[in-house]
Image (spheres, helix red, strand yellow):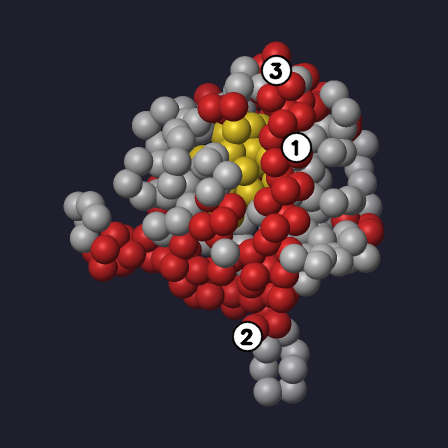
Amino acid sequence: MSGLPIPGLGAGSPVVWGVLNVTPDSFSDGGRFDTLDRALEQARLMSDQGADVIDVGGESTRPGAQRITPEEEKDRVLPVIEALSGQGITVSIDTMRAEVASAAVDAGASLVNDVSGGRADADMHAAVGQLGVPYVIMHWRGHSDRMNELAIYDDPVRQVCEEIEEQVDSAVRAGIERNHIVIDPGIGFAKDAGHNWAVLRAIKSVNSLGLPVLVGASRKRFLGSLLADVDGQPRDSDGRDVATAVLSGLLADSVWGLRVHDVGSTVDALKVARAMNESGEVK
Ligand code: PMM
């Protein structure tokens, strides 16, 4: 693990990011938290379970998803961000748009999580440079409506690392401080199950880029395929939390942060990993 773009977080154990999708259509939790009260209740639960950051997203990125307007995105996320940051919760905005990122930081978000790493909006890097907040650059090749056709690699680990580095260089050129950057290999984005496993097994290669690494494998489709029933039917997203937590435990020593839906099971897994490694006191 390297770097601490959020002071005080990430020393000793990965930072846990709790996912809060305020969308009607995200793949695993779409529609569940699309009223302010339900969103706040879920965020509070995740914080109580040990989430360090609540990652608020208003636009679904599930394969095949259609885009929404910036106004719609802001209407969904800003009231939630204002309320959560008002309660002292550290909030990240999950957006590909500079305009939404700026409005979210004005509303109290402390970090920008951009699944496109700046590829979706030419203004994003300059805007984040101005905002001066930590910025997550995820590996991304194209919007959800075409990401499956972009899942072609000769060497997924090498290409993912190279493509992330290009975005990091572009971000630094645009004024984002290098020590504000977190990188993410983009599990499930323009990657099939084999690509996802290859990247996860080689997570130390991603780490060797020298920046903190965030991984978001939670409830993703490749876990559903792994856990398919005897007829080959993928496991529903609700039934993927044990697999997610096992991955969290396995990655505990190799990543800076983990982005998950079920915070409690990942926090448990991280405690087990720490106890096994005797690398820190288990609280
Ligand atoms: N995955 C999703 C959305 N945002 N952000 C980062 N940094 N990494 C991810 O892997 C990621 C993300 C899509 O999944 P969701 O529906 O669980 O939010």
Q: Which residue is mark 2?
A: 227
* Disc 1 residue type (three-letter): Gln
- Please tell me whether mark 3 sits on a helix, a strand or a loop: loop
Q: Which residue is mark 1?
A: 167
* Disc 3 residue type (three-letter): Gly
Q: Residues within 10 Å of mark 3 (few under 14, many from 20)?
A: some
Which of discs 1 and 2 lies nearer the camera? The answer is 1
Look at the image and tell me whether residue 103 can be seen: no
Instruction: Looking at the picture, tell me which residue is in the foreground, 129 or 21.
Output: 129
Q: Residues within 10 Å of mark 1 (few under 14, many from 20)?
A: many
Pick whichever of labels 3 and 1 is earlier in the sequence.
1
Pick whichever of labels 3 and 2 is earlier in the sequence.
3
* Residue 38 percent across, percent down from the top left: 55, 42
- Please tell me whether mark 1 sits on a helix, a strand or a loop: helix
Q: What residue lies at 54% left-to-right and 49% top-to-bottom?
A: 216
Instruction: Looking at the picture, tell me which residue is in the foreground, 50 or 125.
Output: 125
Q: Which residue is mark 3?
A: 175
| Res 82 quadrant in image | top right
CB under 8 Å between discs 1 and 2: no
